[in-house]
Amino acid sequence: MSEAEQAPASAPEAAAAVLDALNATDSNGTAVLNATAKFVATAEGTALAYGSLVFMALLPIFFGALRSVNCSKSKNAADMPETITSRDAARFPIIASCTLFGLYLFFKIFSQEYINLLLSVYFFALGVLALSHTMSPLMCRIFPASLPNKQYQLLFTQGSGESKEEIVNYEFDTKNLVCLLISSVVGVWYLLKKHWIANNLFGLAFALNGVELLHLNNVSTGCILLGGLFVYDVFWVFGTNVMVTVAKSFEAPIKLVFPQDLLERGLEASNFAMLGLGDIVIPGIFIALLLRFDVSLKKNSRTYFYSSFLAYIFGLGLTIFVMHTFKHAQPALLYLVPACVGFPVVVALFKGELTEMFRYEESSPEEAGPKDDSSESEKKDQ
């Protein structure tokens, strides 16, 4: 969760593989960005850094889970979630391992400077879009009513006449353009300065979008995914030095960072504690699933969501404690997975709802859409 720490089926699946490919935990976050100077963090600086990382990790999980409820009901193509099935979950650790090892070979064979330059441009584009999507609901609230909000449509087609096929059909408005402009400014700031605040803005946006848009179709799939990544994380951290090597070489906003020397050097601090986005998004999508299960029960309580959310806090705190006790890299999922799965299961056993929880099934928007349309047409015929 510090020095060796790093970054939703199709493109989202590959992105999530990169997210979790870089989520080991080490004892001191200073050596990654400042390998030449040894820095001994004060107790106050360490407490502030790790406390801030825990707080930042909770933000995308909490708000991403809330937004995932609305996302699952959305009919807007841009907001459609990507549903992970049990087959996807079973392949996930293999994809993550191949991604991790591929990055390791790239950094060993090719120049780190040029690889990170390409990665910076790639994540600049992704970060601008992710941050713009994250800001959109807030912009809708604060956008002055006196300003005109014009509608736009970006349409790209192939062919003509009856054979015309839509390739891109994106609708947006003035509010979206303002979000895109602000996000682009942050992106340029990140490209030029690589400042830790810009990095965190992009990292938080990636994490929130991952929790919001990546949906597990049921609890069993979540258990398969977390169980597989549990083994994956333990193997690549304790079994080899691959993850640590990649984490130290990979320069991209796929981690949250906070300086341990902030009190001494202010915003120019450079000795960072780190938390990989994989340790946020992977447990986060499972916690978001439990919130949607709570909603499906049509009760006022959010028992499973809050129990798993508190379990995440406990698991993250335990990771930090063990890391500083043994002064050795720790795979955060080693502690987060048993906590985030075990706590809700115990609650379900206590309430007698374990069977109901594992029977809960989410259908993908593509599957749900046609059913709704057909039912509406049947009602009209009647």
Image (cartoon, helix red, strand yellow):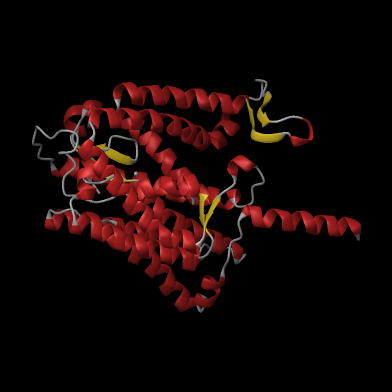
User: Which quadrant of the figure has residue 195?
Assistant: top left
The percent coordinates of residue 227 (x first, y second) are 36, 65
Q: Nearer the viewer, residue 280 or 57?
A: 280
Does the rendering let one see residue 356?
yes
The percent coordinates of residue 366 (x first, y second) are 65, 53
Q: Would you place residue 68 above or below residue 110 in this image?
A: below
User: Which quadrant of the figure has residue 178?
Assistant: top right
Q: Would you place residue 266 above or below residue 313 in this image?
A: above
Q: Nearer the viewer, residue 267 or 379?
A: 379
User: Which quadrant of the figure has residue 44?
Assistant: top left
Q: Nearer the viewer, residue 263 or 94?
A: 94
Q: Would you place residue 291 above or below residue 70 in this image?
A: below
The C terminus lies in quadrant: bottom right
Write the residue at 19% across / 59% down.
Answer: 239
| 137 relative position to 313: left or right | right
The percent coordinates of residue 319 (x first, y second) are 24, 57
Does the rendering let one see residue 49?
no
Write the residue at 56% across / 37% down.
Answer: 137
The percent coordinates of residue 29 (x first, y second) are 19, 42
Q: Single out the residue that lies furthest toward the right.
A: 382
How many numbered marks does the figure carry? 0
Write the residue at 28% across / 48% down.
Answer: 101
Write the residue at 46% across / 55% down.
Answer: 285
